[in-house]
Amino acid sequence: MSTGAPHVRACHLYPEHLNIYADRGNIAVLQRRLEWRGLVLEVVEAGIGDPIPADCHLYYLGGGQDRDQKLVAEDLIAKADPLRLAAAGGAVVLGVCGGYQLLGHRYAAADGRPIPGIGMLDLETTAADSRLIGDVVLDVTLGGRTDTVVGYENHAGRTHLGGGCTPLGHLRRGHGNNGADGCEGAVAGRTVGTYLHGPLLPKNPWLADTLLGWALECAGSAADLEPLDDRLEQAAHAEAATRAGQKR
Ligand code: GLN
């Protein structure tokens, strides 16, 4: 298909393995929010053994259980250089839960064995005996905007950030990275990691648009993202915040 509209390319990494809690929905949201504005998001899938396209403007890694993380870890290391290069060129990288952990240096899984990550985020994760589960509300400042982000977490991993990245947000409700320091997720440049499922983006349209704005910029388009009618999304956001015990 050839249209004059700015063309954003996204790479969905390991859609077969890293896709729990409907994380695939994040891609659908990115696609629709561009479509509603007459723009195009082309999605390329890259699984184990597939080459990773170097010319995408957004790369996405969803959540996965320890077992699936182990299956993809070695392959992700083989893909790390082009991914790093793309990020250095302004591409967005979004990792959710298991994908977030693999963007760090390593994840010591529940069986005690370390699963190597690719160190694009300066963080380490260690599984504990208990899981951190429930609704989450956090305050996030990203791309010049401060707002709340809502979602659902379910992870055994306790993640601790090093000095090379900053938390995505500060918790109002929920456990976040490690249940102790009040922080959730991590950001370094346009590489963003979070434990939030839901999926993340349908209930957080402003966050989706922040990522899309970066991806469009990376695609060389100065196109402004015109506001959409987000009443349904805002209602879902408010409902999730209420469920988490945080009226908003
Ligand atoms: N296996 C990881 C953990 O439990 C990630 C789980 C997930 O992606 N929900 O910490």
Image (cartoon, rainbow, N blue to C red):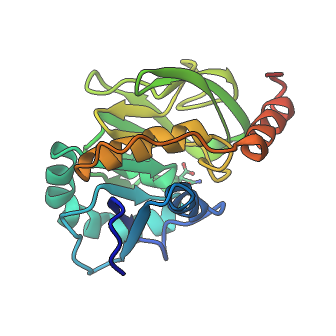
Q: Image quarter for residue 231?
A: top right
Q: Nearer the viewer, residue 189 or 49?
A: 189
Q: Position of residue 243 (x, y in %)?
A: 85, 35
The residue lying at 66 percent from left, 60 percent from top is: 21
Q: Position of residue 109 (x, y in %)?
A: 46, 52
Image quarter in which the N terminus is found: bottom left
The residue lying at 64 percent from left, 63 percent from top is: 22
**Outermost residue toward the front in this view:** 4
For the question of whether residue 42 can be seen, the reply is yes
Q: Image quarter for residue 65?
A: bottom right
Marks counted in the figure total: 0
For the question of whether residue 108 can be seen, the reply is no
Image quarter in which the C terminus is found: top right
Q: Position of residue 26 (x, y in %)?
A: 56, 57
Left or right: residue 149 versus residue 168 is right
Q: Image quarter for residue 40?
A: bottom left
Q: Nearer the viewer, residue 128 or 24?
A: 24
The residue lying at 22 percent from left, 70 percent from top is: 53
Q: Nearer the viewer, residue 211 or 227?
A: 227
Left or right: residue 130 versus residue 157 is right
Q: Position of residue 166 (x, y in %)?
A: 37, 23
Left or right: residue 215 versus residue 129 is left
